[in-house]
Image: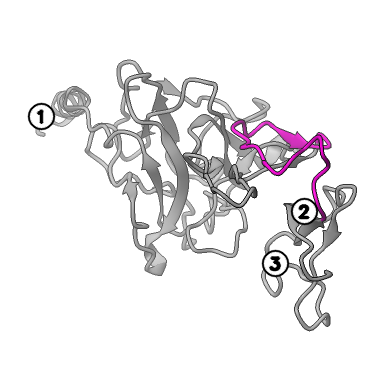
Amino acid sequence: KQPGTPLNGIVLVNKGKEEVPSNFEIVRSISNKMDGNVNNHTKGFVKYIAARYGYPSEEEGWSVNCVEDEEYTLSNQYNFLSSKSLSFNGSSSSHSSSSLLDSPIVKIVVYNSADGQIPDGWNVVERFNSDGSPANINDGSGGNIVHLLYKRSSSSLPITDLGIRFKKSSMQRGESVPKNYDEIRYSMTKAESGNLNSKSGGRGIHIVFRRDQNSSPITDICVIYTDLGDEVPNGYTLLSKTVSGEYKADLNSESGIGRQPHSIYLCYKGGNPPIYDSSLLQELQSLKKKKFGIF
């Protein structure tokens, strides 16, 4: 733009789902030979950065206010990922306390391919360090496509604890839902159960969660593929065991008979340490003893 013309707005636009807002323009590559897709040469969604230039009106002044709520939208379509409050009066510059990317997660749902199209307004859990494509929790198992979706908010009671519960299978005893926890029993539209191993031939695997107003909120979720060498991201907690501590919390456990499903584990940022309930372990051991006479 002309020298001295300030940038006063920037948004991310998903091609085919969103339109470029009024007074914004698509940012192209520096050589102007490419179209500026930030997911270029990947299998991810086509995404563009759109920018707006110019001086604010007298009514707006020089202060750009912080957006605290992730539900705030531009033209009712464009979610701000983060925002900072800036002062351009030449005397000071102040920043908001945190980005929206650190806002608490308040809702988690299981999306199953039987649910139809993923609705707008939800974030999709990704494989860490991937190209931005949604992570299929059933990857390699031959089952239904399963995604984890979540929403953030600073005005609702956040999720503070996560766990993985294994149901009974032909090979292993099942675990109970821990006390004071809720379980995701169904997929988003209840077209299927909330089983992360849906239609894969594996054991039933469900997410359990808890909300505690006195605990730190969970602010991000991702998955890693340990069979491909993925490591736990810095600052994240690995759900390595199920709620009883008895089983490895591989989200593809016992699935994909005759196939080679990936070993997928859930990680989260913030929140409390994973729960490994000793009473649930004792319950499993008691059931084994009754059936086999051994632990």
Residue at position x 37%, y 68% in the image: 229
Q: Which mark is residue 121?
A: none
Task: Report, in whole angstroms, how far the alpha carbon at label 1 lies from the one at label 2.
Answer: 59 Å
Q: Amino acid at mark 3?
A: Val
Spot occupied by residue 99 in the image (x, y as percentages of width and height)? 52, 43
Q: Quick check: 48 left or right of 233?
A: right
The quadrant in which the C terminus is found is: top left
Q: Quadrant of residue 38?
A: bottom right
Toward the front, the furthest residue is: 91
Of marks 1 and 3, which one's residue comes earlier in the chain? 3
Residue at position x 59%, y 32% in the image: 68
Q: Which mark is residue 38?
A: 3
Q: Please name the residue that numbered disc 2 is placed on.
A: 14
Q: Quadrant of residue 39?
A: bottom right
Q: Quick check: 121 left or right of 271?
A: right
Toward the right, the furthest residue is: 22
Q: Quadrant of residue 246?
A: top left
Looking at the image, what colour scheme do you see? one colour
Q: Amino acid at mark 2?
A: Asn
Q: Which mark is residue 293?
A: 1
SS type, badge 2: strand
SS type, badge 1: loop
Q: Quick check: 239 left or right of 142?
A: left
Stretch in magenta: 54-76
| Overall secondary structure of the magenta section | loop
Q: Is residue 227 placed above or below 150 in the rendered structure?
A: below
Q: Is residue 149 placed above or below 154 in the rendered structure?
A: below
Spot occupied by residue 60 in the image (x, y as percentages of width and height)? 77, 37
Q: Which residue is nearer to you in this view: 280 or 289? A: 280
191 within the magenta span: no
Q: Which residue is nearer to you in this view: 134 or 70? A: 70
